[in-house]
Image (spheres, rainbow, N blue to C red):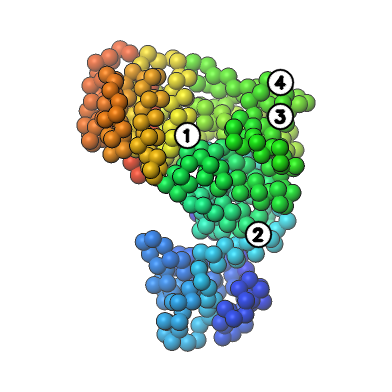
Amino acid sequence: MIKNNAKFTIQELLAIFHKDNVLFNQDINTEKVFIDSREVQPNSIFVAIKGENLDAHSKIPEAIQKGASVCIVEKSWYEQNKENFPNLNFITVKNTIEALGKIANFHRYRYDIEVLAIAGSNGKTTTKEMVAEVLSKKYKVLKTYKNFNNQIGVPLMLLSLNEDIEMAVLEIGTNYPSEIFLLSEIVAPTAGIITNIGKEHLEGFIDLDGVEAEETTLFSFLKKTDSKAFVNMDDERLNLYAMVLDNKFTYGLSTNNMYNLNVNIIFDNALNTTLICNNQETEFQINLKAKGLNFAYNAIPAIAAGLHYKLPIDLIKNALENFIPDLSNDYARMAIENKNNITILNDTYNANPSSTTLALETLKHLSNVEKKIAILGDMRELGESSLSEHISMINIAIKNVDALLLIGDEYSKAKQEIDAPNLFHFESKSNLIDFLYDLLKQDKEKTFAILVKGSRGMKMEEITIAIKNNFFV
């Protein structure tokens, strides 16, 4: 859980919010910032966030009862309710989420440390974990907790900075245009990684041009501040920015030392992964425990960060060779598990066209099995591109599997456009699972690889749980 001890004097709050908005009845010093009234402690600041399901302004009496000395509220709420709280301290703002970002940014500038921001369409969280794992071999690192990567989560991470932290590795995400710009301004990174440009949130970004324009605002901030930009030269859109970024570290798949970090990926037939690396001075090898293309790709910027921040190669190797994906949740990022004659590729955390293509590519590389099945659930937030992207995904998948099992309304529409003997759609998970059981029992002497992937809302982990409960016993 995220905790903070961020302290603010009245003079600092006046500097952040302007005197007309700081309505205090007494001179105070605050300690800690909260957005959850249940966690409020004496002398703290309570920021009343208006969310989709709860308006925290309704929790102000509870926050005050628990000892909050200052409440940051929307001006409209204050005008309607100020008579009910005549002796309390308020800061009034137009938008309390923006206010949370302002105090977090103020707190961030108290510390002269390296702050590495990670953006991109796919692999941000795993890249963040791998980068932090590497850098923590030398530095005291603050890393983003879980997926606290939006305009609420990122400020909470910054507010947890303290004098013990030597470096921060923070993930910044986006759901709509300008969010990366806003988060870059709040975080003020000294370095940044954009993992890739892929088909994400097309409902808001329309197409890849829109995604690129959004994600690369991180590079714009880094260029403006002459901060280090890590450039993925394998991404056909990102590699163009190497021409305009002066302070950069380039990395990519290369055998002729074109970049600051050159990598060759080698898989065996069980997806065990070896990275052959060359930083233009030394060649070294890293054997990953984590299997799959996504982990291989995510490890490369982690190596780049380690080299840039002067970690010895043996520490980088140690960090990545012992990195194990988080398997604490049933929904996972490419967790590969096998028992008896079945290998499950559990990639049920989320899905978009780019990440699903990568998952199918990983399944393709797995060559120590006799039959391959892909189970795909709808990819959401694709807007007007949804039908065409689901049709495209079926066409990509169908060529490389013995059976393609689909679930969801979008895949139902897409399947009507394609006729293939190994293509099946199901109205419910129970029907899909029954069909899958029959497939597995028909060829019970065969070895199977089963990829399961879909958007978070599809809860595709229910399928992996059912497979393991019936065939991993």
Up the image or down, 324 lies above or below 226; here it is: above
Please, what secondary structure does the residue beneath circle 2 have? helix
Q: Quadrant of residue 305?
A: top right
User: Of callouts 4 and 1, which one flags the residue occurring earlier in the amino acid sequence?
Assistant: 4
Are there few (<14), some (14-19), or many (20+) residues within 10 Å of tag 4? few
Distance in Å between CA atoms under marks 4 and 2: 41 Å
User: Does the CB distance between marks 2 and 1 fall below 8 Å?
Assistant: no
Distance in Å between CA atoms under marks 2 and 3: 32 Å
Residue 463 visible within the image: no
Q: Which residue is mark 3?
A: 259
User: Does the CB distance between marks 3 and 1 fall below 8 Å?
Assistant: no
Q: Quadrant of residue 246?
A: top right
Up the image or down, 303 lies above or below 273; here it is: below
Residue 270 x %, y % = 48, 18
| Mark 2 or mark 3, whichever is nearer to me | 3
Are there few (<14), some (14-19), or many (20+) residues within 10 Å of tag 3? many
User: Does the CB distance between marks 4 and 1 fall below 8 Å?
Assistant: no
Are there few (<14), some (14-19), or many (20+) residues within 10 Å of tag 1? some
> Could you tell me which residue is drawn at 72 percent across and 26 percent down?
258
Residue 7 visible within the image: yes
Are there few (<14), some (14-19), or many (20+) residues within 10 Å of tag 2? many
User: Of callouts 2 and 3, which one flags the residue occurring earlier in the amino acid sequence?
Assistant: 2
Q: Quadrant of residue 52?
A: bottom left
Q: Which residue is mark 4?
A: 256
Up the image or down, 368 lies above or below 160; here it is: above
Q: Which residue is mark 1?
A: 354
Distance in Å between CA atoms under marks 2 and 1: 34 Å
> Could you tell me which residue is drawn at 39 percent across and 72 percent down?
58
Amino acid on which disc 3 is placed: Tyr
Amino acid on which disc 2 is placed: Arg
Please, what secondary structure does the residue beneath circle 3 have? loop
> Could you tell me which residue is drawn at 55 percent across and 74 percent down?
43
